[in-house]
Amino acid sequence: MSDDRDKHRQLLSALKQAQGTGDGSFEHAVIRAFEHVFEHLERLNAVSDPGGEDRPLKPGETATLR
């Protein structure tokens, strides 16, 4: 889970640093952030889909924040 927190901090930092630069870096940071959000949603869908497979937890992963 700490890896995920680190990733979240990196993504937020990249967004803050890129604001107002006008060089496309903000758009790139937004895309990276949304890609990560979609990774979370895919993991949640894998768990919550009644017809889907229930995957085992990864080491250090909590059941509520897959």
Image: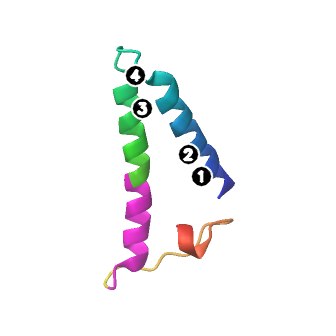
Residue segment shown in magenta: 38-50
> How far is disc 4 from disc 1 in space, using C-alphas?
22 Å
Label 1 neighbourhood size at 10 Å, few (<14), some (14-19), many (20+)? few
Q: Earlier in the sequence, mark 4 or mark 2?
A: 2
Circle 1 sits on which residue?
4
Q: Is residue 65 left or right of residue 60?
A: left
Give the answer, above or below, for where 22 lies relative to 9. above
- Give the residue type that dot 2 points to: His
Say if mark 4 contacts mark 3, CB within 8 Å.
Answer: yes
- Image quadrant of residue 62? bottom right
Nearest to the observer: residue 44 or residue 19? 19
Single out the mark in the foreground, 2 or 1.
2
Kindly identify the residue that appears in the image at 38 percent across and 46 percent down.
35
> How far is disc 4 from disc 3 in space, using C-alphas?
6 Å
Q: Tell me, yes or no, whether the highlighted magenta stretch contains residue 42.
A: yes
Q: Earlier in the sequence, mark 4 or mark 1?
A: 1
Circle 2 sits on which residue?
8
> How far is disc 3 from disc 2 in space, using C-alphas?
12 Å
Give the answer, above or below, for where 48 lies relative to 27. below
**Label 3 secondary element:** helix
Circle 4 sits on which residue?
25
Q: How far across and down, in percent of the image, does residue 43 sit?
A: 43, 65
- Residue 29 is tagged as 3
Q: Earlier in the sequence, mark 3 or mark 2?
A: 2
Say if mark 2 contacts mark 1, CB within 8 Å.
Answer: yes
Position of the N terminus by quadrant:
bottom right
**Label 2 secondary element:** helix
- Give the residue type that dot 3 points to: Ala
Residue at the far front in the pictured view: 20
> How far is disc 4 from disc 2 in space, using C-alphas?
17 Å
Q: Earlier in the sequence, mark 3 or mark 1?
A: 1
Say if mark 3 contacts mark 1, CB within 8 Å.
Answer: no
